[in-house]
Amino acid sequence: MARRPRQRAEETREDILSMAELLFRQRGFAAVSIADIASSLGMSPANVFKHFRSKASLVDAIAERHLGKATDRFAAFDEALPPQDQLLQFVLRLLDGHLQDIKENPYIFEMVLATIDAKLDAGNRYRERIIQKLEDIIRDGIASGRYHCSNLRDAASTVADVLASVLHPVLIAHDDKETLVRRAQHIVSFVDTALQNSPC
Amino acid sequence: MARRPRQRAEETREDILSMAELLFRQRGFAAVSIADIASSLGMSPANVFKHFRSKASLVDAIAERHLGKATDRFAAFDEALPPQDQLLQFVLRLLDGHLQDIKENPYIFEMVLATIDAKLDAGNRYRERIIQKLEDIIRDGIASGRYHCSNLRDAASTVADVLASVLHPVLIAHDDKETLVRRAQHIVSFVDTALQNSPC
């Protein structure tokens, strides 16, 4: 059956991404070139370049596919937990997810390091989802009278910043989980105190 | 004049470090091998290995030499500033120093990335100095009645953690200074609020 060209372009794009992931996983991110990916697919490098102009744009698409699927990290909480407990649960869920990503797919960590100066869209979009979830939690806290905060966006953004040492892959990859969980508990209790008393 | 062997070993060590820094600066960290450093000094690689068993131990020594000299960042404040202003000044001094390091010596950033999994002693010692300075500031705040905190060490350590997004080289290398200063102000005001109200 004949396919329409647009459909095939999308399929080709997905094939390239899947092959890239496979090769990154097998050989490591640094060892795989766009030419390697093309030849494993029986395609010309020019054809791959039509879809991804650089290794960074490939990484961006792989990261987006991966992070877009991580919806469970942002799911609502079953019971109506107090905001400080929501905050801790959310942070521990993210921490857990990030540690699992690093463990199961070591090439993801290599990818993050190699493209750290590219400030990929996928990273920005993921950070934005985190900030929005933090806004939801802080809003709950304001509604329940625990938190006081006039600028929700600024507060959520600062909370995301102070959580870097327990969420950013580069900062968590080489600490053990127990240390990270204790650190997360300390930071969340700090954040909870600040949000209760903040004139922000 | 004859030199004692121990003295010469220390001098050789310093020569190796200086040559390594020079070559890293000229060619970038990844492009320089221990063999390159040896040949530029007219030494055998085995002789260099006697002093530094790995590139990571070389990096550790260079970082130590560099960070050990950064004493101005930890100097006392001229006037008796309120603790929240001491905190902000200290953070902005560190941020400034780190941005200058990255700008003047791009190979330092490359070194940090390449040895991020080695958890170098130089990094740990530098972090320890930061925590001690933070302890001093919090202690001042307790003495003046602004801060309340029973576990000084834990509090200082958590403050160091929440400052990662404005101090860690990997997290600041690609943001502009204005953004970082504003982020630092937000975090310090957060920290100040938490320390004023903390039951920690």
Image (cartoon, coloured by chain):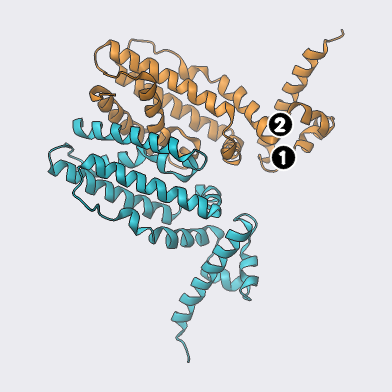
Chain colours: A cyan, B orange
Residue projecting furthest to the top: B1
**Hey, which quadrant is residue B186 in on the image?**
top left
- For label 2, the residue is B20
- For label 1, the residue is B32
Q: Where residue A149 sits: x, y (%)?
A: 18, 38
Q: Where residue B104 sits: x, y (%)?
A: 57, 32
Q: Residues within 10 Å of mark 2 (few under 14, many from 20)?
A: many
State which chain disc 2 sits on. Answer: B
Give the residue type at disc 1.
Answer: Val
Q: Where residue B83 sits: x, y (%)?
A: 31, 17
Would you say A1 lies left or right of A110 here?
A: left
In 3D space, how far apart are the residues under numbered discs 2 and 1 (Cα atoms)? 8 Å
Front one among B16 and A139 = A139
Q: How many marks?
A: 2
Task: Looking at the image, tell me whether mark 2 or mark 1 is earlier in sequence order.
Answer: 2
Front one among B53 and A63 = B53
Above or below residue B200? Residue A23 is below
Q: Is residue B182 visible?
A: no
Q: Do discs 2 and 1 share a chain?
A: yes
Residue at disc 1, secondary structure: loop
Q: Are marks 2 and 1 in contact (CB under 8 Å)?
A: yes
Q: Residues within 10 Å of mark 1 (few under 14, many from 20)?
A: some
Give the residue type at disc 2.
Answer: Ala
State which chain disc 1 sits on. Answer: B
Residue under the image location 24 percent in, 17 percent down: B146
Q: Where residue A6 sits: x, y (%)?
A: 44, 80
Q: Is residue A2 visible?
A: yes
Residue under the image location 45 percent in, 40 percent down: A177
